[in-house]
Every structure is written in structure tokens, then in C-alpha cells.
Image: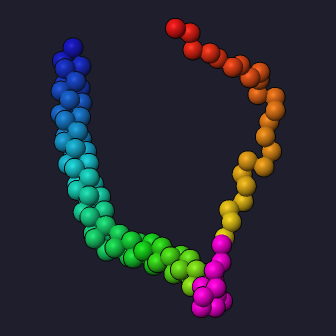
């Protein structure tokens, strides 16, 4: 019975020791990850945002370039009307029966 108690105390002592060391190691890992993400965010995020802004600016300039090239072909005093395509080209006659309602007083 005495050896079982010693064995139990020995296990408890080393479990506490390992638990504390694992806890400290976990805290250090969390802090390291936090500061690494903070540093990466400080340097990488602005570069990423700059690239995105350049892409948006490029697309905007391409769209503006198309409209300015279209306007360059128009002579002064000439009117151009761009017609939108007719979206209601086909009507569906199978929508139901028409009912004419009358107001009753």
C-alpha cells in the first residue's frame, strides 16, 4: 500500500510539472503567433491592398478608355443614340384569363 501511495504522489507531481510546462509552452506559442500575425499584417496587408487597388484602378481606366475612344469617333454636332436591347421581345400569352372588374356601390 505504501508503494502505491508513493507511485500516486510521483505521478501527481510529474503531471503537475508537465501541465505547468505545457501551459507555459502554449502561452508562448500563442504569443509568438500573435506577434507574427501582427508583424505580417503590418507589412503584408498594405502590399496586398496596394495590389488590389492597382487592379481596380486598371479596370477603371480600361472602362474609361473604352468610353473615351467611342466618343472620339463622333464628329462635332453629330448625335448618336445607343439603344438598349429589347428585353421583352417575346410575350407569354399563356398567363391566364383577363377579367374586367366593375366597381359596385
Using the image as rendered, state which of residue 71 and residue 11 is in the foreground: 71
Q: Is residue 72 magenta?
A: yes
Q: Which residues are magenta?
A: 70-81
Rendered location of residue 93, percent (x, y): 81, 32
Number of numbered tags placed on the structure image: 0
Q: Is residue 99 left or right of residue 58?
A: right
Q: Is residue 62 visible?
A: no
Whether the magenta-drawn stretch holds residue 5 is answered as no
When asked about the image quadrant of residue 17, the answer is: top left
Q: Residue at x 72, y 51 (%)?
A: 87
Left or right? Give the position of 14 relative to 84: left
Given residues 23 and 62, the one toward you in this image is 62
- The vertical placement of 93 against 99, above or below, is below
Spot occupied by residue 70 in the image (x, y as percentages of width and height): 63, 83
Work out whether 34 lies above or below 59. Answer: above
Q: Residue furthest front?
A: 105
Q: Nearer the viewer, residue 26 or 67?
A: 67
The residue at the far top in this view is 105
The residue sitting at 22% across, 24% down in the picture is 8
Residue visible at 35% across and 69% down in the picture: 45
| In the displayed structure image, the side of residue 73 where residue 52 appears, left or right | left
Q: Position of residue 104 (x, y in %)?
A: 56, 9
Amino acid at each position: 500500500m505504501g508503494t502505491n501511495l508513493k507511485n500516486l504522489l510521483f505521478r501527481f507531481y510529474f503531471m503537475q510539472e508537465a501541465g505547468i510546462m505545457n501551459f507555459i509552452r502554449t502561452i508562448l506559442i500563442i504569443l509568438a503567433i500573435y506577434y507574427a500575425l501582427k508583424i505580417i499584417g503590418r507589412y503584408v496587408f498594405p502590399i496586398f491592398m496596394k495590389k488590389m487597388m492597382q487592379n481596380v484602378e486598371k479596370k477603371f481606366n480600361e472602362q474609361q478608355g473604352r468610353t473615351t475612344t467611342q466618343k472620339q469617333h463622333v464628329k462635332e454636332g453629330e448625335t448618336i443614340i445607343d439603344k438598349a436591347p429589347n428585353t421583352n421581345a417575346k410575350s407569354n400569352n399563356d398567363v391566364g384569363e383577363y377579367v374586367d372588374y366593375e366597381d359596385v356601390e
